[in-house]
Amino acid sequence: MFFRMLSVDWTVLRRPVPDWYRDAKLGIFVHWGPYSVPAWAEPTGELGAVDDEVWFRHNPYAEWYWNTIRVENSPAREHHKEVWGDAPYDHFLDVWRTDAFDPADWCALFARAGARYVVPTSKHHDGVALWDAPGTGDRNTVRRGPRRDLIGEIAGATREAGMRFGVYYSGGLDWSVSDLPPLTRHEETRRYRPNDAAYAAYAYLHVRDLVDRFRPDVLWNDIEWPDAGKHGGSLGLLELLRHYYDTVPHGVVNDRWGETHRDYETSEYQFHLDSESASAWENCRGIGLSFGYNRAEGPEHLLTGRALVRHFVDVVSRGGNLLLNVGPKADGSIPAGQRRTLEHLGDWMAVNGRAIHDTRPLSASVAQPAQDPYVRWTRSGDTAWALAPAGGTVLLSCDPARLDAAAAALPDGRAVAAREVAGGIEADLPGAPATGPDAPDLLAVGFPIL
């Protein structure tokens, strides 16, 4: 099998990244599963900023609950004993109810926030499928728990709202198909993952079914792909991805299939930031420290609208997309803190979206970003957009000979007073539409490029 892996010519899958993906800028990730019932993890810190030995024992990802409660002496294990006793993980599937789930409401909120694609988890590491996946028996949400095809419902509502639809699938981990020990270090995610031919076929048939049923615009695999499936024959990854592109010619796949094929690369919170130098990339993160809903998180753990907008414009200014995660409660309602942050983003995008959607990075020879004051730049056509603090005079570091200061304007066309000064252009920006410590404080001002 190792020889067959090396003999595959993955370059036959290479193709230009579709413009729709580069133009989209914002996607919404949705982590929702049986783990949303206990909904508990320690809000330790961001991935990439927490020591590896601390991370797994004190994992802030609520969707990793099944793994964390298996780690000896972990606080999650103690929490489980106190609250749930000796209940097995599948108890959460059986008691999972989705009475407050309104996919149209979800998607109206996501579209208002400026999202152009939505990517729900179809099967996370716990192996529970959110559709009637082949080979899962009754271990899916159609046969147990919610007794609904959650993926089908989200797909329909997403497209009805005018956004593109994608699917997340955990091909690299499935704790339900093996007796492997709990993960306690990142390197163990490679050592303790199912790699046999039976699991490779199982995962292949799942993803092929997702492709045939839902024709996802984004195929987002996680962790890895089983080694026994990295071949060019029947039930192999090469065949699977070829089938995907034949079925969805404009579709895109991420980089978490091992050393095989990718359309774009991914970073996660502060992890794998080297991926952000790729020609096409995406940063994924939650509004809080977890992807799955975590009842242990407080307001202090969530991005405010202001912090989110600053992170978002930084990602976009450097050529990336942001896949921002929402973790619904088990009943399908979106937690108030997450909803409030998305509403702040939506209000901001309604005013400044022209400086975000359909843009590209602006050449550093024209203008430079800054931290104090916080300034980022994008470009659409012949317009350079500065995203800078509202409500005052700001110095924009740029080559004033390359930008027309006299024609500076807001996205709605209102003129902005601006003038050439030593070191760049000085602009007088009006106040932000919304005020308060949580409200976004940046405003877009456009300059014709000379």
Image (cartoon, grey):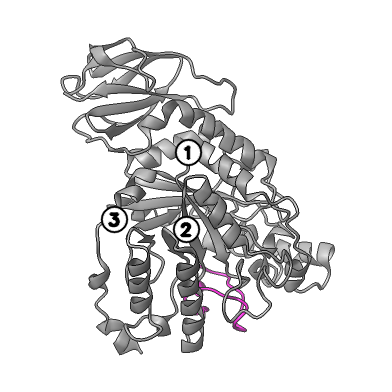
Residue 189 within the magenta-colored segment of the rendering: yes
Distance of mark 1 from mark 3, alpha carbons? 21 Å
Q: Position of residue 218 (x, y in %)?
A: 42, 59
Residue identified by numbered label 3: 17
Residue range highlighted in magenta: 171-193
Mark 2: amino acid: Gly
Count neighbours of disc 3 (C-alpha within 10 A) and say few if under 14, some if 14 to 19, many if 20 or more.
Answer: some
Query: How many marks overall?
Result: 3
Q: Is residue 352 above or below residue 284?
A: above
Q: Position of residue 198 (x, y in %)?
A: 50, 88
- Label located before the other in sequence (1 or 3): 3
Residue 109 within the magenta-colored segment of the rendering: no
Q: Is residue 287 left or right of residue 70?
A: left
Q: Which of the labelled discs sits on residue 114, or is there none?
A: 1
Q: Position of residue 419 (x, y in %)?
A: 26, 11
Q: Is residue 163 above or below residue 374?
A: below
Q: Secondary structure at mark 1?
A: loop
Mark 3: amino acid: Val
- Label located before the other in sequence (3 or 2): 3
Kindly indicate the quadrant of the structure image that contains residue 383.
top left
From this viewpoint, is residue 223 visible? Answer: no
Q: Secondary structure at mark 3?
A: loop
From this viewpoint, is residue 429 visible? Answer: yes
Which residue corresponds to the image point at 37% horizontal and 19% vertical from the top-left?
410
Q: Are marks 3 and 2 in contact (CB under 8 Å)?
A: no
Kindly indicate the quadrant of the structure image that contains residue 373.
top left
Count neighbours of disc 2 (C-alpha within 10 A) and say few if under 14, some if 14 to 19, many if 20 or more.
Answer: many
Q: Is residue 197 left or right of residue 280?
A: right
Residue identified by numbered label 2: 166
User: Which quarter of the figure is the N terminus placed in?
Assistant: bottom left
Q: Is residue 192 above or below residue 381?
A: below
Q: Secondary structure at mark 2?
A: strand
